[in-house]
Image: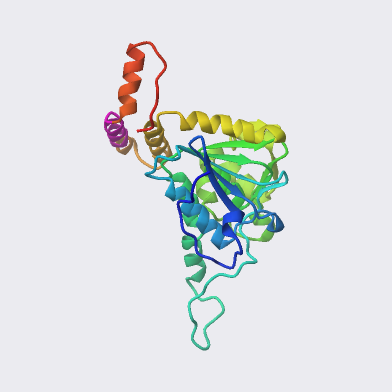
């Protein structure tokens, strides 16, 4: 076990370190949601702690891969915990309960920090989805680089059931995973998506029996953690931008990624091991 790499603000949560558990094993950072009384929903404090932990792994050498999972077998994350109050600026007499701009600011300072932290993490991030992932909980998984689901788990684009607009970057990530038409279908009808269907749609990479989920996630995470970390970092950077830039920009990005990677010790080790016909010994830098 290792020390946390972040500081969290208290938004009314009694024990953020228990609700968002953190440890490093075999160079894999494990972030575990443990808020069963609220369906593993994320309060603002829990969300901010996750952001700090994910960002805190960047530029460090203790961890070379991240796994996000949750306790129990029923729920991965049921979304945002709307029962927890949020800090508001002092209000003059006569001000409305919700002023124009406050919801937007809440989004920008909330879920729209968590999802980019995962997408922009220097490390590969695996979601080990142990149970139902609804709303923001589903988007939390979709933004991870790899998704392993328990066979009992499911995704739900729950927003339409509540008359809400999808948030947590769902309208950006979901069409990139399944295409525009299918994304609209999933969001409009808000039906349960079983693990088997998620696999067929490309929303997850692998389905495992519930009892084997952590073992499967561990095997993948430890393979990544023992790999060429900077090569994986630059590969993630290129692929995540590939659908948002024109070909000429991607050419520049690719050329710079190769330039940067060629300066790593692991790149030199890769060439040496190939020439010497042996397995490479990746150091992560």
Report the coloring of the rendering: rainbow
> Chief secondary structure of the magenta span?
helix
Q: In this view, does 20 lie to the left or right of 257?
A: right
Identify whether 92 is placed above or below 241.
Answer: below
Q: Does the magenta stretch include residue 258?
A: yes
- Could you say which is closer to the camera, residue 237 or residue 68? 68
Q: Which residues are the magenta region?
A: 251-263
Identify whether 120 is placed above or below 147.
Answer: below
Q: Report x, y in % for residue 10.
A: 54, 66
Q: Is residue 120 left or right of residue 177?
A: left
Q: Report x, y in % for residue 113.
A: 47, 55
- Could you say which is closer to the camera, residue 106 or residue 32? 32
Identify whether 249 is placed above or below 111.
Answer: above
Quadrant of the image for the C terminus?
A: top left
Q: Report x, y in % for residue 2.
A: 50, 45
Rendered image quadrant of residue 42: bottom right
Q: Is residue 60 left or right of residue 2?
A: left
Q: Report x, y in % for residue 267.
A: 32, 25
């Amino acid at each position: 076990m290792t020390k946390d790499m972040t500081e969290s603000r208290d938004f009314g949560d009694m024990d953020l370190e228990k609700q968002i558990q953190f440890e490093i094993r075999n160079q894999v950072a494990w972030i575990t949601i443990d808020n069963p009384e609220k369906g593993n929903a994320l309060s603002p404090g829990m969300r901010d702690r996750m952001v700090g932990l994910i960002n805190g792994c960047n530029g460090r050498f203790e961890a070379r891969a991240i796994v996000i999972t949750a306790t129990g077998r029923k729920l991965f994350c049921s979304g945002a915990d709307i029962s927890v109050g949020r800090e508001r600026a002092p209000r003059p007499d006569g001000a409305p309960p919700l002023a124009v701009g406050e919801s937007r600011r809440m989004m920008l300072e909330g879920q729209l920090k968590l999802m980019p932290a995962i997408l922009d993490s220097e490390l590969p991030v695996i979601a080990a989805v142990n149970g139902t992932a609804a709303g923001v909980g589903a988007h939390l998984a979709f933004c991870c680089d790899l998704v392993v689901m328990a066979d009992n788990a499911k995704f739900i684009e729950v927003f339409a059931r509540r008359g809400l607009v999808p948030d947590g970057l769902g309208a950006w990530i979901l069409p990139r995973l399944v295409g525009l038409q299918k994304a609209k279908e999933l969001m409009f009808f808000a039906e349960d998506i079983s693990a088997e269907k998620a696999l067929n749609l490309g929303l997850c990479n692998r389905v495992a029996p519930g009892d084997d989920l952590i073992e499967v996630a561990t095997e993948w995470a430890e393979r990544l953690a023992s790999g060429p970390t900077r090569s994986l970092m630059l590969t993630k950077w290129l692929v995540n931008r590939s659908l948002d830039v024109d070909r000429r920009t991607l050419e520049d990005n690719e050329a710079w990624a190769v330039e940067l990677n060629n300066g790593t010790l692991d790149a030199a080790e890769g060439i040496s091991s190939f020439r010497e016909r042996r397995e490479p010994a990746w150091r992560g830098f």
